[in-house]
Image (spheres, grey):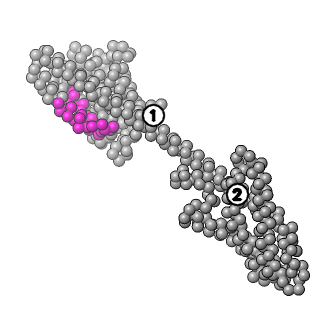
Amino acid sequence: MTASSLARPLLVPPPGLEQLRTRLLLLGFWAVLGALETAKEFTTARLQQTQRTLGDAIIVNFPWWFFWVIGTLIVIDLARRWPVDRERPLLAAARHAIAAVVIAGVHLTFVAVLGYLAIARGGNTAGADLRVQIWFWIQAYIVLDVFVYWMVLGAYHALLYHQRYLLGSLREAEASARALRLEAAAAGARLQALQMELNPHFLFNSLNAVSGLVDEGRNQEATTVIARLARLLRLTLNRGHERHIELEREIEYVRLYLAMEHVRFGPRLKFDIIADDVILHALVPPMILQPLVENAVRHGASRALGPVRITVSARRDGTSLLLGVTDDGPGLNTAGDGDGTGLSNVRERLLTLYGGDAGLTLGRGPAGRGVSASIRLPLQTHGAPAPAPVSAA
């Protein structure tokens, strides 16, 4: 249903088949009232043992109510011409009051003439006088007819107000949906910018590692790191702009990176990757672990005098996925030492993707040594679609 279809008043005859349907509904409504009135009058005549037949009851009552099929369409047309809810409601009400009396007079004259031709004949002098018949019907039923006019007018406006309410609700819903789409598009653009920001950041760190090996004359190791870096970059470029990848692929990136750093640091760097097989197909943001691992290498292995072990872990915790990177190095020097580009990027991406349902925490490593970084995010698989970006607000 579109806004334009809602904007059209319900009782205004629409074109084509809908126009026929509207008129049939009006005919059925007034026919039901005519049938009820006929049944009441005929039953009353039988109980009072009068000579009025079923045909007489039908002739008197059905034309009375069938007239209002046309009368309803006339009232609705007048309601559209003279709306009582606009700038001059008193003038519109006065016009409708005059129209109600005129329509009632026409209706009752029509009924009187029909009754005169069909029933009021024979020796009944009063019944044979058409003017007396007309005056009798007008005097007896004009109040009822005027009431029916205002009842139809009120029903039309009630339906019109209902449709305006539905139209307003629909427009509000469309505006909200449009705002959400724009907000999601903005969040998606921000997410893509954050993801692209990681690529040069990671690349520069890797090239610095190669540069360090070359400066130390370790050309063979530098060649090995370049080869592994080329493989890692191919995997990254093939990934495109995916918002989520399987945890197994993310762990593969981390394993390649740690293998590169192992060449650089030698026996001073050891690493373990612990992940349950059942969650390897869980969906995570690409390169979500990479900044944490780089942070562990920079603040752990680079500063330590002895061997440092980095442990990457992934496990399920109810409906959440817990990702962790810990090291047993010297730890952070200051409270804000870990808030670099990589970790800030991770926090913003988690907030953009999951809102308050995900987060990153930093703390002491095992036995009070080193650093422990932990990410909690909703557990998503291919069976359950990954979430769309949400507002950071």
**In the rendered image, the vertical position of residue 366 relative to residue 159, given as above or below:** above
- Between 302 and 214, the one nearer to me in the picture: 214
Where residue 245 is drawn, which disc sits there? none
Lateral position of residue 216 relative to residue 104, left or right:
left
Start-end of magenta stretch? 230-258
- Which residue is the site of mark 1? 391
Lateral position of residue 251 relative to residue 136, left or right:
left
Identify the element where label 2 is drawn. Answer: helix
Which residue occupies 85% across, 86% down? Answer: 122
Is 286 inside the magenta-drawn segment? no
**In the rendered image, the vertical position of residue 327 relative to residue 386, given as above or below:** above
- How far apart are labels 1 and 2 at the CA level? 50 Å
Residue 167 x/y as whole percent: 58, 49
Q: Work out whether residue 63 can be spotted.
A: yes
Lateral position of residue 201 relative to residue 90, left or right:
left
Q: Magenta: predominant secondary structure element?
A: helix
- Which residue is the site of mark 2? 78
State which quadrant residue 391 falls in: top left
Residue 290 x/y as whole percent: 28, 28
